[in-house]
Image (spheres, grey):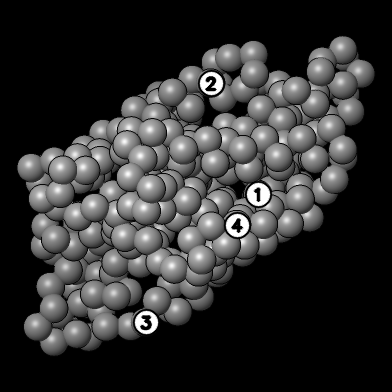
């Protein structure tokens, strides 16, 4: 095992990432074999199934990218799902009800996500509130604001054929998964920020030992708040990709997506204790979550089975992370 881990190719890619890629391949094969057996007449290996899984992976992936920065600092954000829905609801309502130009509405979505990220970051970094409590409060605020603004009505964004439907090209254009290209491009930028810039290094150091970083003269408040702001911006982007794939948004929802975004991060190798994060791992984790969701539905089971599997995977991943840290220490 050690010889494999020390291989140059394995080191370059990362042993954990290779394992995750193997998990994706294994899951795909399992679903491909079991779907026709458990659900008569169904076929998992189709282009539509592939695109459906990608549609789900996009918004989970963007949220996971944002949460990765927060967890890297040792924090947590349970508001990402409802904030995504609030962003999609309010910006969509502005578009459909008040006829505000589509580009402005897309910017509104980004600004709403950024506003919530800034709010969370301010209270955690400058007012020293626990991130768990702060994000739970933001979650409730986001659900309430989205419902109040739209008068508890669902919002349906323009569908295919409408003059304002060009935003859907961000997700798919001529059967080309443009969303995957954008997600990978944003992930590369996030990886550079987290691993190659001063801001990213400080975020990781804050997650490892915040007090030591502060005593060394670093303004930890600024960099910790920045992590939450990046998370909020990613959630605003996730909202755009959600409506690009599904068009209709209902108020008061989004809670379950918090767990899936966090699960993607944890599966990808981001430590819940902070100080260790993987952008590529979070993207692979999002793909696993999306693949499980699509596979379970293809086999004829309800989405509740995915929640069970996701919970088990998170428990295993966190336990493995804690045991690994204990061995190293």
Is disc 3 in contact with disc 2, using a CB cutoff of under 8 Å?
Answer: no
Mark 1–mark 4 Cα distance, whole angstroms, equals: 18 Å
173 or 150, which is in the foreground? 150
Q: Earlier in the sequence, mark 3 or mark 1?
A: 1
Mark 1–mark 2 Cα distance, whole angstroms, equals: 20 Å
In the picture of the structure, the residue carrying the numbered disc 1 is: 77
Element on which disc 2 rests: helix
In the picture of the structure, the residue carrying the numbered disc 2 is: 193
Res. 151 mark? none
Mark 3–mark 2 Cα distance, whole angstroms, equals: 39 Å
Q: Quadrant of residue 223?
A: top right
Question: Is residue 86 left or right of 272 when viewed as pictured?
Answer: left
Q: Earlier in the sequence, mark 3 or mark 2?
A: 2
Q: Quadrant of residue 166?
A: top left
94 or 68, which is in the foreground? 94
In the picture of the structure, the residue carrying the numbered disc 4 is: 145
Q: Earlier in the sequence, mark 1 or mark 2?
A: 1
- 247 to 130, vertically: above or below: below
Residue 158 visible at all: yes
Query: Which of labels 3 and 1 is toward the front?
Result: 1
In the picture of the structure, the residue carrying the numbered disc 3 is: 302
- 199 to 182, vertically: above or below: above
Q: Earlier in the sequence, mark 4 or mark 3?
A: 4
Tell me the residue at 44%/68% (across/down): 153
């Amino acid at each position: 095992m050690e010889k494999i881990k020390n291989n140059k190719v394995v080191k370059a890619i990362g042993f954990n990432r290779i394992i995750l890629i193997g998990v994706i391949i294994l899951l795909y094969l399992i679903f491909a074999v079991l779907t026709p057996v458990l659900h008569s007449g169904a076929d998992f290996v189709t282009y539509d199934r592939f695109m459906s899984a990608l549609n789900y992976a996009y918004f989970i992936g963007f949220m996971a990218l944002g949460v990765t920065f927060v967890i890297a600092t040792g924090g947590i954000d349970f508001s990402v799902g409802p904030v995504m829905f609030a962003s999609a609801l309010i910006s969509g309502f502005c578009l459909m009800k008040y006829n505000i130009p589509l580009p402005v509405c897309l910017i509104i979505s980004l600004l709403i996500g950024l506003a919530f990220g800034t709010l969370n970051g301010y209270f955690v970094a400058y007012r020293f509130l626990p991130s768990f409590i702060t994000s739970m409060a933001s979650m409730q605020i986001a659900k309430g604001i989205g419902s109040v603004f739209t008068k508890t009505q669902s919002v349906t964004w323009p569908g295919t054929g409408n003059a304002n439907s060009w935003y859907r090209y961000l997700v798919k254009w001529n059967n080309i998964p443009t969303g995957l290209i954008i997600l990978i491009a944003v992930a590369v930028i996030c990886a550079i920020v987290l691993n190659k810039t001063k801001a990213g290094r400080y975020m990781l150091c804050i997650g490892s030992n915040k007090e030591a970083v502060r005593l060394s003269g670093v303004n930890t408040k600024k960099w910790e708040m920045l992590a939450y702001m990046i998370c909020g911006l990613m959630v605003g982007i996730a909202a755009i990709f959600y409506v690009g794939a599904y068009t209709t948004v209902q108020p008061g929802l989004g809670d379950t997506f918090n767990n899936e975004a966090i699960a993607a991060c944890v599966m990808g190798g981001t430590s819940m204790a902070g100080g260790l994060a993987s952008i590529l791992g979070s993207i692979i984790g999002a793909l696993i979550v999306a693949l499980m969701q699509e596979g379970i539905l293809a086999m004829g089971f309800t989405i509740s089975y995915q929640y069970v599997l996701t919970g088990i995977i998170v428990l295993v991943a966190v336990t493995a992370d804690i045991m690994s840290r204990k061995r190293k220490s």
